[in-house]
Amino acid sequence: MIEAKPWTARRRGAPRRGADPRPFFGQTLPLALLKNIDSFMAVRGVMTIIVRGKGSWTLRFGDQERPLEPGTAKDADLVAAFVPSAFEAFVRGELEPHRALATGRVKTRGDRRLFARFAQVIDVQPKNLVSARMAAL
């Protein structure tokens, strides 16, 4: 049995560099996709996630052959670029999307509705009203 280490956010007082997202994309996300395979297969679209200074990954909803791969995709329906702390907050369900977009902590190009689909597939529960509104898109 494979045991995934949870992806954790930085500790209080730690540098603002942000945690390494590779364990999330290498372990946590693949396990979440398997757990929520029906939700994942029901969605169509390509989402590239860039965590600035940390890397980029492409998620192909509904694609069993290559659901997740490192790098960016030219055919992405949504490109979302996060500063590391914003990505951590998104995964924890604590990101305030409108504020993050307004302040440049998150920049997007394309169909933002894939954000909500991604949150549903990885089972992120919004912890505040603003995140809940974004998830409803």
Image: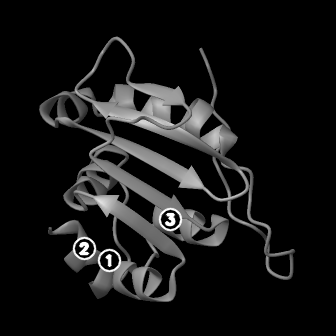
- Could you tell which of marks 2 and 3 lies nearer the N-terminus? 3
Please give left or right for residue 98 compared with residue 28 in the image.
Answer: left
Q: Residue placed at 74% from the left, 58% from the top? A: 19
Residue 114 position in % (x across, y down): 25, 53
Residue position for label 2: 134
Q: Residue placed at 34% from the left, 84% from the top? A: 98
Measured in 3D between alpha carbons, the distance from the residue under mark 1 to the one under mark 3, in whole angstroms, is 11 Å
Please give the count of numbered marks on the rendered protein: 3
Residue position for label 3: 92
Q: Would you identify the image quadrant in which residue 38 lies?
A: top left
- Could you tell which of marks 1 and 3 lies nearer the N-terminus? 3
Under circle 1, the secondary element is: helix
Q: Residue placed at 51% from the left, 26% from the top? A: 69
Please give left or right for residue 89 compared with residue 9 in the image.
Answer: left
Closest to the observer: 25 or 32? 25
Q: In the displayed structure, would residue 90 be above or below residue 2?
A: below
Which residue is most to the front?
74
Q: Residue placed at 43% from the left, 35% from the top? A: 73
Please give left or right for residue 43 compared with residue 127 in the image.
Answer: left
Residue 90 position in % (x across, y down): 47, 66
Residue position for label 1: 131
Closest to the observer: 16 or 27? 16
